Image (cartoon, rainbow, N blue to C red):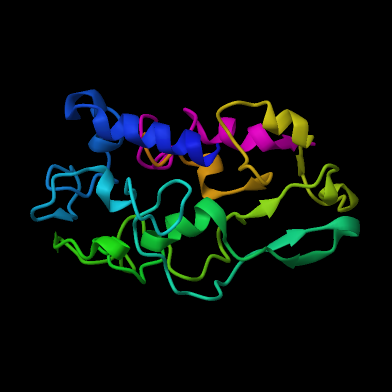
């Protein structure tokens, strides 16, 4: 999505009455305002979008990002398979994944909205180990992010793998499971931070873009 489209979408969301947002982000744990449904929320702030986005003076232009970014220089990342079955560390998180980690790695206060200052919170000031949503800085046990998917199936040389990769053009045409503008798989490929309609505790993760785990996995992968 271009910067102009992000701006238009954000302004439309900010202009919408709170009732129109019900069922969207305002009804999810990402609503950290005083009206939020989670145990962590602001003691005073009523603006729902303010914790992540600002209309002016953004820290990241796309998508008008307002939350302070993590200063972690290097995360522990999983290995990915490249040509001839070679394994190498996944790239460091970038793009939308880096924005997500500004809260979820637990190193930045949830109410630290960067240039706009700090918002006082109740319940917790930042995500900590043991809290839902906490990822920390060791991502080695998670699906790699910020990876540019190869045009061919780089894992096919490893005959012991039972999961392959669909052609990139099919993944791009899938619709709900999206790569970013650089063709990279990010947190936002599988998770929609603004809607949590499919969450089913123990079965379907938070902010999942499709009704089942399998539907999301098989949007990119294929069984052999």
Q: Nearer the viewer, residue 131 or 123?
A: 123
102 within the magenta span: no
- Report whether residue 208 is seen: no
- Residue drawn at x 35%, y 40% is 201
Q: In the rendered view, does 118 fall on the left or right side of 202? A: left
Give the residue furthest to the top: 20
Quarter of the figure with the C terminus:
top right
> Foreground residue, 115 or 169?
115
Q: As drawn, is 16 to the left or to the right of 179? A: left
Residue closest to the eye, 16 or 213: 16
- Could you tell me what secondary structure mostly forms the magenta stretch? loop
Q: Quadrant of residue 202?
A: top left
Give residue 178's position: percent from left, percent from top. Answer: 59, 36
What residue lies at 18% left-to-right and 44% top-to-bottom?
A: 47
Q: Quadrant of the N terminus?
A: top right
In this picture, is 155 found above or below 72? above
Which residue is the extreme one toward the left? 44
Occupied quadrant, residue 35: top left
**Residue 100: x %, y % from top left:** 44, 55
Q: Where 9 falls versus 111 (above or below)?
A: above
Magenta stretch: give its range. Answer: 196-224
Image coords of residue 78 (percent x, y): 64, 64
Which residue shows up at 41% across the image and 32% down it?
8
**Is residue 89 in view from this perspective?**
yes
Where 158 falls versus 213 (above or below)?
below
Residue 202 inside the magenta-drawn segment: yes
Q: Residue at x 62, y 55 (%)?
A: 146
x then y, percent, for residue 147: 68, 54
Q: Does residue 219 appear left or right of residue 163 in this picture?
A: left
């Amino acid at each position: 999505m271009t910067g102009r489209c992000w701006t238009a979408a954000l302004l439309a969301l900010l202009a919408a009455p709170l009732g129109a947002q019900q069922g969207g982000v305002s009804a999810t744990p990402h609503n950290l305002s005083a009206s939020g449904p989670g145990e962590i929320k602001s003691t005073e702030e009523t603006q729902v979008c303010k914790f992540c986005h600002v209309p002016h003076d953004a820290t990241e232009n796309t998508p008008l990002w307002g939350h302070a970014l993590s200063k972690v220089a290097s995360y522990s990342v999983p290995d990915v398979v490249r040509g001839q079955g070679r394994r190498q560390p996944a790239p460091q998180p970038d793009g939308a994944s880096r924005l997500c980690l500004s809260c979820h790695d637990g190193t930045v206060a949830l109410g630290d909205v960067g240039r706009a200052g700090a918002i006082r919170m109740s319940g917790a000031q930042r995500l900590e180990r043991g809290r839902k949503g906490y990822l920390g800085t060791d991502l080695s046990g998670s699906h790699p992010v910020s990876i540019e998917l190869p045009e061919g199936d780089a894992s096919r040389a490893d005959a012991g793998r039972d999961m392959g990769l669909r052609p990139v053009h099919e993944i791009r045409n899938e619709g709900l499971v999206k790569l970013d503008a650089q063709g990279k798989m990010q947190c936002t490929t599988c998770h929609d931070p603004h809607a949590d309609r499919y969450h089913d505790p123990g079965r379907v993760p938070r902010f999942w873009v499709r009704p089942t785990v399998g539907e999301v996995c098989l949007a990119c992968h294929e069984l052999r």
